[in-house]
Image (cartoon, helix red, strand yellow):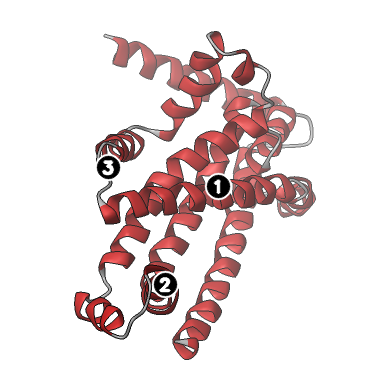
Amino acid sequence: MYTNDHEKYVKKDKIVMYEMHNLKKGYGEDEMFKVSYFLEVLPIIASKVDVTFQLTVVATIFALLVGVIIAIIGYYKIPALYQFTRMYVSIMRGTPIVAQLYFFYYGIALYSAFVRDMTPLIAVAVVMSLNMGAFMSESIRGALLSVDEGQKEAAYSLGMTNLQLVWRIIIPQAVRVALPPLFNDIINLIKQTSLAFMLGVPDIMGAAKIEGARTFRYFEIYAAVMLIYWVIIFILGLVHKVLEKKCATMY
């Protein structure tokens, strides 16, 4: 029953948007895609790339920190903590990021003044750090486990300490293995930041929503959004290739 009611609501909302689009002065229904408006709205939406960039950088740094800690706990199977981190990773990987955002920002905020006083940007950064940290931990743990046990035994036989083993043997090899999946995680994180507008963060999607409410030219607006995200991901892919080559020559 709810599904049918919800579908009717969505359909009605789309009809209203279509009618408002056609009533807007200067935009006829025969103009399917207006290039001049696309070029006009593109820089407006692109001006919010800095917000998306800030959110991505902060979330990536803390997600890596969370991921490394969880991966080390999993690698050494530290009692008690290992079971906790397994449950944490399962919850974060098994529930939608939107539900996590709402649970944190609207749910936990009811009982925590600290969360309640957070700005939407910080709240989104916290949730996405915790979420992506769970995914990154699996990439990092897999990279650590990829190092052959024989190399570790050889290192100990040469008199290396645990710190020397980690720094000279494990990390150089683990970085090369972890780099591709970690970059995939970062790409997914950039895409996830598009949900930040749901909490009122004025990012790329937030700017698109404002422009959409003003002009109802959703075709051009979201085409611009897709182009901006595609360019960002494309550039990140080039950076990934450069780093991968450097790692290959370095180790």
Residue 198's x, y, as percent?
A: 58, 28
Q: CA distance from mark 3 to mark 1?
A: 20 Å
Q: Amino acid at mark 2?
A: Ile
Looking at the figure, which quarter contains the N terminus? top left
Residue 172's x, y, as percent?
A: 42, 77
Q: CA distance from mark 3 to mark 2?
A: 21 Å
Residue at the spot of label 1:
62
**Residue at the spot 78% in from the left edge and 49% down from the top edge:** 47
**Residue at the spot 50% in from the left edge and 50% down from the top edge:** 65
Labels 3 and 2: the sequence-earlier one: 3
Tell whether 129 sits left or right of 2: right
Residue at the spot of label 3:
82
Q: CA distance from mark 1 to mark 2?
A: 19 Å
Residue 219's x, y, as percent?
A: 60, 43
For the image, the number of numbered tags is 3
Residue at the spot of label 2:
171
Residue 211's x, y, as percent?
A: 72, 35
**Residue at the spot 51% in from the left edge and 40% down from the top edge:** 128
Occupied quadrant, residue 215: top right
* Whether residue 96 can be seen here: yes
Labels 3 and 1: the sequence-earlier one: 1
Identity of the residue furthest to the front in this view: 159
Labels 1 and 2: the sequence-earlier one: 1
Within 10 angstroms of label 2, few (less than 14), some, or many (20 or more) residues?
A: some
Q: Amino acid at mark 1?
A: Phe
User: Regarding mark 2 in the picture, which secondary structure is present there?
Assistant: helix
Within 10 angstroms of label 3, few (less than 14), some, or many (20 or more) residues?
A: some
Q: Give whichever of 156, 3 is nearer the camera.
A: 156
* Tag shown at residue 175: none
